[in-house]
Image (tube, rainbow, N blue to C red):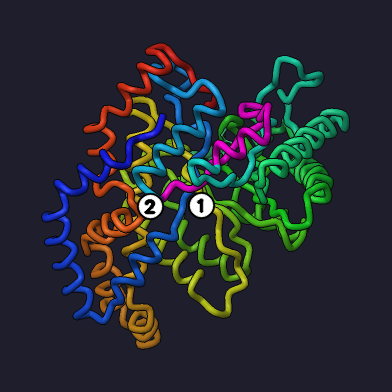
Amino acid sequence: MRIDNQKIKQLNDQALPDHRESFDHLSKVLNKKNIDVNRAVEKLKEFQVAIPSWALGTGGTRFGRFSGGGEPRSLEEKIGDVGLLHQLSQSAGAISLHIPWDIPEDVEAIKSLAASHNLLFDAVNSNTFQDQPDQELSYKFGSLCHVDKAVRQQAIDHNLEVIKYGDALGSKSLTVWLADGSSFPGQLNFKKAFQRTLDSLQQIYAGMPSDWKMFVEYKPYEPNFYSTVIQDWGSSHMLADKLGDRAYSLVDLGHHLPNTNIEQIVATLMMVGKLGGFHFNDSKYGDDDVTVGSLKPYQLFLIFNELVDGMEDPSSNNPYPAWMIDASHNLKDPLEDLLQSLEAIRVAYAQALLVDRKALEEARENNDPTLAQEILQGAYRTDVRPLLAEARLQAEGALDPVAAFRALNVRKELIAARGEKTVSTGL
Ligand code: AOS
Ligand code: ZN
Ligand code: ZN
Ligand code: ZN
């Protein structure tokens, strides 16, 4: 399904007078502060966030799952859904696949379908946290860290196969997230598990094409409840460092214990050029995977403040990070939820672009925390939504994506095409 561009334009035309008024007002305010509004709009137009294939259906918990209607039933339909998000928001220009949930049967057809929606293939994800029906050995007691060499080899081979699929589609990176760990004290030898994981990752790293990157994700607990082999950014960084120049840490916002200073982790990793990827979501307790910006928008802004600082630092050798939303939706329409997440990410990014970095640095040099706070909160409390809307308007997206999604009855049409009882693959 594709939305008729003419219909988006009609909705935009209705909302245009109000948009012009608020954009002109904001432009005047920002111009007075010597902020280049056009530059901010251009930066927003460039900023694209990948959508994971598993976020397009209704998520669930171990207590149950309440499916919505019209969920994508195939890789083609998942690409179609990301196409809709991109058409409305002009900011979801990539899809991240998960193997074996998304095995492309006809690679050329999948490539041209994605291209017809202006989508790129972002990092591919391997899956050694579940047993597949035809799988010989079990991952019940781990995968890349397993005590049995044969299980490790199976997990290595799986990752190499994922790389092959990704390479055929034009992906340039592999994200490795491991559920490996232990649920009971004494169960696992921490040191041996870590060393076996490093050894396995080295073999996968060696199998990547020379222009590929590896992103090593960390997580303190879940599904294992006592220890996780790659529990934190330090462990992830140790691995990335030992693996080589093309291995990086990946920060998932939900993978920290409560109150962790994530912005400091971001700054530190970028300082050493090792922040490769990012998974956006929001968290109150753990890996809640709720809508980005729904709980802690100020924290998100502080994180973006460091990200922008790292990206604009001429002395930094950190690569441009791979952005992805990693979320799950139990109650909301997944597409509406993703549109809200995209908006929240871009709001935080735009606010961070408004920070007067020179003045902030001066305040720091002068030991003036009051002024530093004034500068940060001045940017944070600016309503930047007209900048986002302007960027979308210029790119022929919708001024208000969620309103357009509803006004154009997108979900109703998806249900008509796919049915009321649909279950998408994923978590
Ligand atoms: C798991 O908690 C991680 O966030 C992964 O990045 C991701 O959610 C998983 O690979 C999806 O199955
Ligand atoms: Zn993640
Ligand atoms: Zn998460
Ligand atoms: Zn997670």
**Quarter of the image with the N terminus in it:** top left
Count up the numbered dots.
2
Question: On the image, numbered disc 1 is attached to which residue?
Answer: 323
- Height in image: 345 above or below 227? below
Which of the two residues, 186 or 206, is positioned nearer the viewer here? 206
Magenta stretch in the rendered image? 91-114
Give the residue drawn at x 57%, y 53%.
277
Q: Which mark is residue 345?
A: 2
Give the residue drawn at x 23%, y 70%.
378
The part of the image, by quadrant, that contains residue 329 is top left
User: Residue 281: x percent and y percent?
Assistant: 43, 43
From where the camera sits, is residue 300 visible?
Answer: yes
Residue most extreme to the front: 6
Amino acid at circle 2: Ile
User: Residue 395: x percent and y percent?
Assistant: 36, 55
Is 231 situated left or right of 349 in this image? Answer: right
User: Residue 406: x percent and y percent?
Assistant: 24, 32
Give the residue drawn at x 63%, y 37%.
227
Question: Is the residue marked by circle 1 packed among few (<14), some (14-19), or many (20+) residues within 10 Å?
Answer: many
- Height in image: 412 above or below 4? above
**Label 2 residue SS:** helix
**Label 1 residue SS:** strand
From where the camera sits, is residue 299 visible?
Answer: no
**Magenta residue check for 187:** no
Give the residue drawn at x 44%, y 58%.
47
Amino acid at circle 1: Trp
**Cα–Cα gap, marks 2 and 1:** 10 Å
Is 18 situated left or right of 304 in this image? Answer: left
> Disc 2 vs disc 1: Cβ atoms closer than 8 Å?
yes
Question: Is the residue marked by circle 2 packed among few (<14), some (14-19), or many (20+) residues within 10 Å?
Answer: many
